[in-house]
Every structure is written in structure tokens, then in C-alpha cells.
Image (cartoon, rainbow, N blue to C red):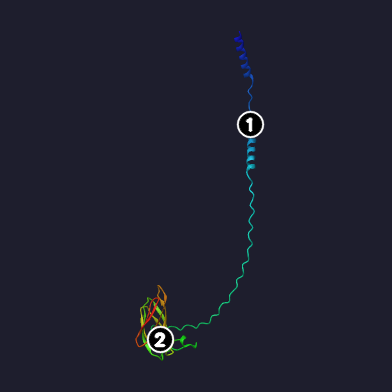
Amino acid sequence: MKRISFVIVLMALMLSACSQATPTTDPAQIQASAVAAANTMVALTQAAVPTETPVPPTPLPSPTPLPSPTLLALPTLPLLTSPTAAPAAGGNTNPGGDNTGDPCQSAMPAKPAGPQIPVRILNNTKGSIVLSLYLAKNDFGECGYRSFNLEAGASSSTTLPQGCYSGGAFVNDPKKPSKSFGYGCFKGDTGATVAVGPEVIKISQ
């Protein structure tokens, strides 16, 4: 009898438990809670980010005025006389002096007073040359210039007063134009040679 009563009481408790309605959760309330939590997290994250303090611009130095340039006085150059035209190939310049008053700054006289030496002029370059020979004042007081034009590989014979000469030539080589210079002396009766190379003039006797 006691056993039956226990079973009945147990069944009654189970029925009463099943009869109570299980509470349901409102979806709108859950969504509102989630949105509120998300907004709170965003606000806290933004508050934790440090604010950037703008760096003040560096002031630029004011330009320093440069000193004004001082113009220098240009030197006064003397007027140059026009050069004497060179003669035909193998010839010499027009004899006689110029109007400078210095006989050494002009062409040598055609008939010098002192002895002369036969001279062979050789153009050993690959272009035409314009050669000038300058005679320093010799024992007879003679000095001055004499010029010659020679084609490539050509030669010329002339007579020149005894003395010491400085030579200069423009070499008109179409591939490699240049200038040649040399120095030498003529003495005695032996003939002399003036050989013009691309860069050197050999004056020998």
C-alpha cells in the first residue's frame, strides 16, 4: 500500500512539473542587448585611441640678401694691325717695313746687307701649311719676318740671312689640324733645312 502511494505521489509531481509553462526569450530584447553592447565596445575603443597632436610647422629662415656684384674695370687693349697676306706657294712676303717704327716687327728687306744662306723648306705634313720664320736681330742689324705657303708634301727653296730663327706654322690637315713651332740658327756657307712636321719645326744646318 505504501508502495502504491509513493508511485502516485511521484507521478503527481511529474505532472505538475510538466504543467508549468517553460518561459520563452524575446528575440527583440536579445537583439537590442547585442546592439547596445556593440555600441559600448566601439565607444570604449575610440576613447582608448590617443589623439594625434599636430606638430607646429618649423619656421623658415628669412632669406638673407646677397651682396650686389661689383663690376671690375675691363683692361684697355691696343688696336691690332691687320696681318699681311701670305704670298703664293714658295714665295716670301712683300719686302719692306711697316709703319710701327720697329724694323723687327715687319717683313725682312728683299736685299739684306749681310750674307745669305740657301734654305730648303719641306712640308712633311698631310695638309697645306702657312709658315712664318722670324729672324732675331743678327750681327748686321737685320731682323723681321718672312712667310711661306706650301701644299701637303711640297718643298721650296729660298735664301735667308744668317742668324737665329723662330718658326711657327699652321697645319691645315683636314683630319687633324695643328700648329708647329721650332727654333734654330743658320751660320756659315752651308745650306740649311726647315722641315715642318705636324707639331715640330726642325731648323737645321
Left or right, 122 with reference to 77: left
Q: Nearest the camera: 187 or 29?
A: 187
Q: Residue furthest left?
A: 190
Q: Nearer the viewer, mark 1 or mark 2?
A: 2
> Whole-percent x and y of residue 131?
41, 81
SS at circle 2: strand
- Residue position for label 2: 163
The answer to whether 68 is drawn above or below residue 186 in the figure is above
SS at circle 1: helix
Q: Which mark is residue 30?
A: 1
Residue at the (62%, 13%) spot, across then down: 9
Q: Quadrant of residue 34?
A: top right
> Whole-percent x and y of residue 38?
63, 37
Left or right, 191 with reference to 142: left
The answer to whether 19 is drawn above or below residue 141 in the figure is above
> Whole-percent x and y of residue 119?
36, 85
Location of the C terminus by quadrant is: bottom left
Looking at the rendered structure, the number of numbered marks drawn on it comes to 2
Name the amino acid type tagged 1: Ile
Residue at the (65%, 31%) spot, across then down: 29
> Whole-percent x and y of residue 32?
65, 33
Q: Few, some or many C-alpha atoms within 10 Å of disc 2 (few <14, some 14-19, many ≥20)?
A: many
